[in-house]
Image: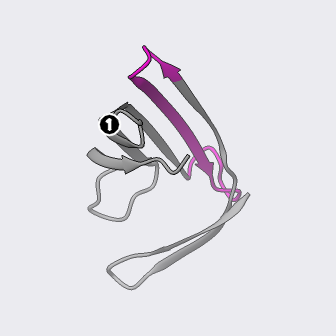
Amino acid sequence: MGYRFESYSDGTTEKDPTGVLGYETNYNLNSRLNLFHDLTYYPSFSSPGQNYLLVTNFGAEMPITNDEAWKLRASLRSQYNSQPALDAETTDTNYRLNLVYDWE
């Protein structure tokens, strides 16, 4: 459960209590390559079937050092907004390449 606040470039705002439902999964393809996927659904309590965000990530991560502390992560992130701002796209897609340090 959460609270969503959005501020638009035309000065309008949107405030709404929201829910959160999702999952996250990891799969070790081999000893050095990990695949991951997550999906999160953020429905508006005022109109859950009509006003919602859907966010998904899919990617792979592999260590680049022998101690496996430093990793390279490549991922695709997609965010769908069922009711975007006027003249905005419904889906935002990001391609990411990250250098990650694992403290464990």
Of the pair 87 and 42, the residue shown nearer to us: 42
Q: Amino acid at mark 1?
A: Thr
Q: Residue at x 63, y 50 (%)?
A: 43
Q: Is residue 67 magenta?
A: no
The reply, left or right, for residue 17 in relation to residue 6 is right
Counting labels gives 1
Q: Residue at x 40, y 58 (%)?
A: 84
Q: Residue at x 30, y 48 (%)?
A: 99
Instruction: Inspect this view and state whether residue 91 appears.
Output: no
Question: Is residue 33 placed above or below 72 in the rendered structure?
Answer: above
Q: Which residue is mark 1?
A: 65
Of the pair 103 and 55, the residue shown nearer to us: 103
Q: Around disc 1, counting alpha carbons within 10 Å, would you say few (fewer than 14), some (14 to 19), or many (20 or more)?
A: few
Q: Quadrant of the N terminus?
A: bottom right
Q: Residue 15, position in %: x, y?
A: 60, 73
Q: Residue 93, position in %: x, y?
A: 29, 45
The reply, left or right, for residue 79 in relation to residue 38 is left
Q: Residue at x 43, y 25 (%)?
A: 35
The reply, left or right, for residue 15 in relation to residue 46 is left
Q: Is residue 38 magenta?
A: yes
Asked which quadrant contains residue 72, the reply is: top left
Question: Is residue 20 placed above or below 32 in the rendered structure?
Answer: below
Asked which quadrant contains residue 62, the reply is: top left
Residue range in magenta is: 27-51
Q: Residue 50, position in %: x, y?
A: 57, 48
Of the pair 2 and 97, the residue shown nearer to us: 97
Q: Residue 92, position in %: x, y?
A: 32, 49
Q: Residue furthest bottom?
A: 11
